[in-house]
């Protein structure tokens, strides 16, 4: 197992050279996590649901989690207008800090956009980006599902007509502390972050945010996110459902979760990567045959570790200089970069967002402390189970709607990995594999299992809404309505 982890680390390091710099931060974040497992933080084979002693303690604690007086803070958080935004903005925006640990001085930053039409009747969506340690503001809000995209000048915003606040009221949470504008006055918190503390803090954020926005207390809540949010989202959902059993605690009306290109299981995930590369003509027949012969990702035991290492290394070399997060997309060419249409993916977007969020007038408008904002942060990760499948299985058993969606041009957390993971559940099929449509075109493919839906988004990379915003909006609209997208 350690040999295969070390090989995966080597692969991720090589990808930093091969992929576009737009995704380098996310690669480095996952690389750091896996690299740490080779020494002080080996992977824990126990499922996360067996590691939640703190959650159980909170359930039996009469006082529940920390809840502060939020009087007047909603009004203080209202954004008058973001610098460079379009003239006519017909929805309310809020941003600010929510304290989740007063003793340590830990506060999480959020950006919230209400729906322009009939917001009081629409559900609440909490969006989380992964990494671990990457910003939901910089990725989710500014490059994916938020109401604006940043122009190539790094100073002005263009409207995103496919924003998810068309169908929901959306919170973007920068989590854990140390990511983006979120912070802690206890610096040791940055080196002692992990899956459990992130779930606990995100839950504390929600409880306090609902006190600040009491009109949303009874609203249907959906959790969504991508990549390492394949950990964040199911774990937070489990935390919510566990704490809902505490009669003295705020009951959160969780309805469902949607996770995109989600890293949920290391064995099926790693095998799925190599099979995807071969099936998309990115690796040779010899490489794929060697990996299947000598690498046993499922049990963690290889019949010949050196041979496994050899064929994986060969696979790395065969990739060439491509963006593995979207195997058919161009790399960033700064001299030719520009944002014309929201529908046209710009691989240099992260540069524009970084420039914009570091403008003094932007940080002032967002009500944040002046700081050097970055897309991803070097937070230490102290716990990360090798699989999240047991917790997803529990959510399905409890009746929580679970959608796992996948952009089909992502080679980093590909659709093959997601399919292999879902297949381990052995769920009965209720809706056979079929195409679904968005704007008279095939938007992707889906299969409905009992309690879980797998849905692909055609032509989308790792960050699905960045590549196919209209199809992503069609998908999430139907998810929130609890029905599958149309078959014609």
Image (cartoon, rainbow, N blue to C red):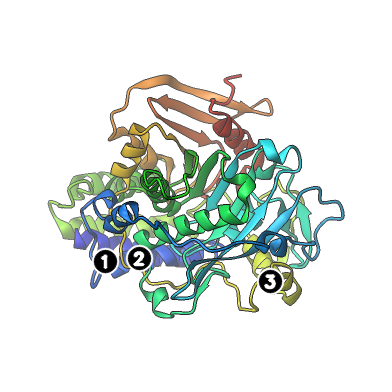
**C-alpha span from label 3 to label 2:** 27 Å
For image coordinates 76% across by 43% down, the residue present is 116
SS at mark 2? helix
- Label 3 vs 1, first from the N-terminus: 1
Left or right: 314 in relation to 136: left
From the image, tell me which residue sits under label 2. 33
Q: Residues within 10 Å of mark 1 (few under 14, many from 20)?
A: some
| Closer to us: 72 or 423 | 72
Q: Position of residue 381 (x, y in %)?
A: 35, 68
SS at mark 3? helix
For image coordinates 50% across by 45% down, the residue present is 223
Left or right: 41 in relation to 255: left
**Looking at the image, do the residues carrying marks 3 and 2 touch, with CB atoms under 8 Å apart?**
no
Q: Residues within 10 Å of mark 3 (few under 14, many from 20)?
A: some
Q: Quadrant of residue 392?
A: top left
From the image, tell me which residue sits under label 1. 37
Q: Position of residue 76 (x, y in %)?
A: 71, 65
For image coordinates 18% across by 52% down, the residue present is 300
Left or right: 173 in relation to 284: right
Q: Position of residue 63 (x, y in %)?
A: 39, 58
Depicted 439 relative to depicted 254: above or below: above
| Closer to us: 6 or 80 | 80
Q: Of the numbered discs in the image, which one, if any, rests on residue 355?
A: 3
**Looking at the image, do the residues carrying marks 1 and 2 touch, with CB atoms under 8 Å apart?**
yes
Q: Position of residue 404 (x, y in %)?
A: 45, 38
- Label 3 vs 2, first from the N-terminus: 2
Depicted 70 relative to depicted 463: above or below: below
């Amino acid at each position: 197992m350690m040999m295969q982890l070390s090989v995966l680390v080597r692969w991720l390091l090589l990808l930093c050279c091969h992929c576009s710099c737009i995704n380098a931060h996310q690669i480095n974040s996952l690389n750091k996590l896996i690299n740490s497992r080779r020494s002080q933080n080996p992977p824990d084979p126990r499922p996360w649901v067996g590691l939640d002693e703190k959650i159980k303690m909170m359930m039996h604690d009469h006082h529940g989690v920390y809840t502060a007086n939020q009087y007047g803070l909603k009004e203080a958080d209202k954004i008058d207008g973001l610098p460079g935004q379009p003239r006519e903005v017909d929805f309310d925006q809020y941003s600010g800090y929510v304290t989740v640990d007063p003793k340590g001085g830990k506060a999480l930053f959020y950006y919230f956009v209400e729906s322009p039409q009939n917001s009081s009747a629409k559900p609440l969506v909490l969006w989380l980006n992964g990494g671990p340690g990457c910003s939901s503001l910089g990725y989710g809000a500014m490059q994916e599902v938020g109401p604006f995209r940043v122009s190539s000048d790094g100073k002005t915003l263009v409207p995103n007509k496919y924003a998810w606040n068309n169908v929901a009221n959306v919170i973007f949470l920068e989590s854990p502390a140390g990511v983006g504008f979120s912070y802690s006055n206890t610096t040791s918190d940055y080196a002692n972050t992990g899956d459990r503390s992130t779930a606990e803090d995100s839950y504390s954020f929600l409880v306090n945010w609902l006190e600040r926005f009491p009109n949303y207390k009874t609203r249907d809540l959906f959790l969504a996110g991508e990549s390492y949010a394949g950990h964040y989202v199911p774990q937070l959902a489990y935390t919510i459902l566990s704490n809902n059993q505490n009669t003295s605690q705020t009951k959160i009306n969780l309805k469902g979760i949607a996770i995109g290109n989600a890293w949920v299981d290391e064995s099926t995930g790693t095998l799925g990567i190599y099979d995807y590369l071969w099936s998309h003509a990115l690796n040779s027949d010899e490489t794929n045959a060697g990996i299947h012969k000598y690498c046993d990702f499922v049990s963690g035991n290889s019949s010949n570790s050196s041979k496994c290492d050899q064929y994986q290394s060969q696979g790395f070399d065969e990739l060439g200089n491509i963006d593995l997060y979207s195997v058919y997309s161009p790399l960033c060419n700064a001299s030719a970069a520009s944002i014309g249409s929201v529908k046209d993916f710009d691989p240099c977007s992260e540069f524009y967002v970084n420039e914009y969020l570091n403008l003094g007038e932007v940080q002032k408008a967002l009500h944040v402390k002046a700081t050097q904002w970055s897309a991803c942060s070097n937070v230490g990760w102290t716990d990360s189970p090798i699989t999240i499948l047991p917790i997803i299985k529990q959510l399905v058993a409890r009746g929580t709607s679970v959608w796992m969606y996948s952009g089909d041009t992502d080679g980093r957390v590909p659709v093959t990995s997601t399919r292999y993971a879902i297949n381990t559940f052995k769920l009965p099929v209720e809706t056979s594999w079929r195409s679904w449509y968005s704007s008279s075109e095939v938007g992707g493919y889906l299969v409905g299992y009992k309690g879980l839906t797998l849905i692909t988004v055609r032509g989308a990379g790792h960050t699905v809404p960045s590549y196919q915003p209209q199809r992503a909006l069609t998908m999430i609209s139907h998810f929130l309505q609890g029905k599958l997208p149309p078959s014609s």
